[in-house]
Image: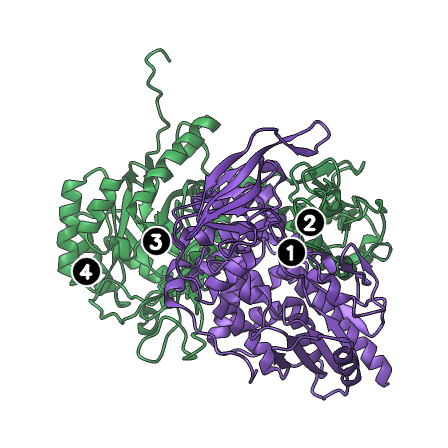
Amino acid sequence: MSSGIVKRPDTSVDFAGIKSPNPFWLASAPPTNCGEQIMRAFDAGWGGAVWKTIGAQVTNVSSRYSSIDWNGQRMMGLNNIELISDRPIEVNLREITEVKKRYPKHAVIASLMVESTREAWHTVVQQAEDAGADGLELNFGCPHGMSERGMGAAVGQVPEYAEMITAWVKERARTPVIVKLTPNISDIRVVARAAKHGGADALSAINTINSITGIDLDTFTPRPYVGGKSSHGGYCGPVVKPIALNMVQQVMSDPDAVLPMSGIGGIANWKDAVEFILLGSGTVQVCTAAMHYGYRIVEDMIDGLQNWMTEKKFNTIEDFRGLSLEKVTDWKHLDLNYKVVARIDESKCIGCDLCYTACWDGAHQCIHLDRVSGPVDGHVEVHRKPAEVEAMSRERITVTPIPKLDPPPEAGGPYVTPLARIPRVDETECVGCNLCSLVCPVEDCITMVEVNTGLPPQSWEQRTSSSPESVAEKS
Amino acid sequence: MASQTIFEEHPEIAKLFPDLHPPLTRQAAVIESDRCLNCFDAPCTSACPTHIDVPRFIKKIASGNLQGSALSILDANVLAASCSRVCPVEVLCEGACVMHRYNKQPIEIARLQRHAMDTFHAKGGSLPMKSDIERPGKIACLGAGPASLAAAAELRQQGYQVTVFDKRPLPGGLNTYGVAEYKLPTSSSLREIQLIADLGVEFRFGIEIADEAALAELEREFDVIFLGVGLGAMQKLVVPGGDHPAVVDALKFIEEYKLGLKTKVVGDVVVVGAGNTAIDAACAAKRLGANSVRILYRRTEEHISAFDFEYEHARHEGVSFDWLTQPVAVHSFDDGLSSIECVAMEIGADGSVKQVTGSSFHIKCDLVIPAIGQSPLLEFLSKFRDLKMDKGCIVVDRATGQTTDPKYFAGGDCVNGGREVVDAVADGKRSGVAIAELLEGAHV
């Protein structure tokens, strides 16, 4: 391009008729509590916001959140027992109008939850749309507090209720209706189908997962602590992403449930967002990451997404939306004759030997520390066991090396890591489980390499339907 | 430890010698522990002479099990608190950390170990017994330094009666008297040893085995004798004027300031020698107020026996180095020293050093601190007739510390010629285990 200005990919979306400059929406939660916050979020770059759920005004407790830290990382998972908006409904409605007036190109979705009567729903739908909301999200998912009052997950867990209320809403709604699904159900598709049957224009998933994050070992009270007691809450944050991705995939692959999907659950960066879009989501909603680091995180979400799209030559979100759906199949269709084995790059190995201990205790005993003694392939019996390896090290007498007195230690091999500490994979025994490559702290040190089995692809389904002896294996 | 002299930290010294490596806070310790990869058969553990199970104690810090962490450390090394402060970890555990090959800073093992030990001491922790029965064997440990203390603790924990003898009024040997205060304060050394005394180890201070009669008496009273006597006095600066009272050997100098007997140094100081003790003394002189501190060394930078990080530390503290410089005389006048006379040296093609003719020069100084090594205790050890010696060191079986006289075991500097505290502890611990096995066999 001679101008020198590179045209960036188009991130705008049309989600079931709701237009948004990018797919990044703030989920209905504390970051969307009021107009002032949402306007700051839009200034930061968010494409849309789902207003903190509007309904009959509630009183909240103190405290409200608890979290899971893991290995020094704060808030891998966040749990909350906060209810819907505790502000007067008319204040929320007035602010929706104000936000829409000042940010006409951004998506403002009203999240709604009222008592389960047709009148109540008709009223709140009318109010939200009159205020100027671009769409409605029906909160059938809140798993704590509201569900005890017959709302939230109490609706979302019963397909008939979900369908009925969706239908009530559709009787009155002029804007697109999104039904937000709860994961606290054995099969999320059942309620998704009910919502679709009730006339929903779109779905969003997942809401938070029932949880108790932990217990104070001095007071024996779970967190969050509320005057000597606690209550189960809703779990979200990076830890829930795999559960959310699976549920989104389930719904999007189900012809009776599929609708435009707003993906929710542990999205903290552009990569997470791309994954949800690859499984069919048209927009994504973010909460925990914004609560942790603030609205500013959206800048890299947009930038990273655009750079990735440029690299992959995608011009619009639709160009790649849903591309991964065909890559997910039932286990019975996987090729049983495809084989990979682990390969360790000696020049990258740092000698932590985590792959060794993981393979011995957590996998198939096919990684060995025998590069100095001489490699021997074969079953577990022919190898030194981890306890023997360790015992030998403990027997060794070690002294502090004194610069003048002691010769420098020998390199112990051609690599930076002494050969004795570089593990070896017995490829005849390796089942290709991936575990070693997952525990290895060094990027690209252990790779899983395809080996040719010489056999044609064959799935479990094919094997059990084609060969008589396989019937015995099946049982 | 009824007979122990009460030691009180001198406030002036405490102020001048704050911790070189400040302690970690609880949260910082957890963050650092979480960085540890938890290697299998960890190289840090192999590199430690006492084989402390490093990932084990670190992950116990991460899990909040501080008590378990400390006990797992103490199980391998009863002087773990002082080792966490004095060990040259750059060439031991931290030097072996795989993080070096991972383009990351090694895990701060020493500071984590100190965190576990400090917490243990603060909570009034005590060393566990490993046996619930009292065993009949009696063991004498000669010298109350790290080797003897490790042997004594192991044997006492197994139920044996142990008595530790030392000619000084305080236990700990060089741990108490000879380590730079910014690394290990005397009070910390004593606090750690108190736990060994609390096990029921008896200490007899101010006692020297002066003659063969005393030795015979000792052999009558005890079944096994462990020699942890260390090395002898520091070598003298054998030059004219080298016996002037303002020529003070490094260990004496360090001891005097640590005990609060010397809280100030005036004028210019010259340290002779470039080992780790020379550096401890030079840095101390600087902190105590010396106008200038110079280290004289007859060879060059690459030949010094100090660890690299000690050398760097000395430069950081403002100590300067004069290479290829050999003292030949100390000059004095009525009130004190005037100068140290030196000659320049040159290194020949064969590596030998010789004086450069006519190169004599004077360095003005008020205090000379020779730090040119300790001599072996040859005369003392000659009393033990059946001990085989080699180059001033007692010959032992490395795995057990047993000497050529089966009733005698030995470890630490008197065996290895002068290494680190952790080497002495490892020797003492191995001997403790071996002595227990010997006595167990004898009494079955």
Colour of chain A in the rendered structure image: green
Residue at the disc numbered 4: A123
- Neighbour class for label 1 at 10 Å: few (<14), some, many (≥20)? some
Residue type at mark 4 is Thr
Residue type at mark 3 is His
Foreground mark, 4 or 2, reads 2
SS label for mark 3: helix
For marks 2 and 3, give the CA distance.
35 Å
Residue B158 in sight: yes
- The chain ID associated with circle 2 is A
Q: Which mark is residue A292?
A: 3
Q: Nearer the viewer, residue B80 or A230?
A: B80
Colour of chain B in the rendered structure image: purple
Q: Residue at x 73, y 67 (%)?
A: B380
Foreground mark, 1 or 4, reads 1
SS label for mark 2: loop
Residue at the disc numbered 1: B374
Residue type at mark 1 is Gln
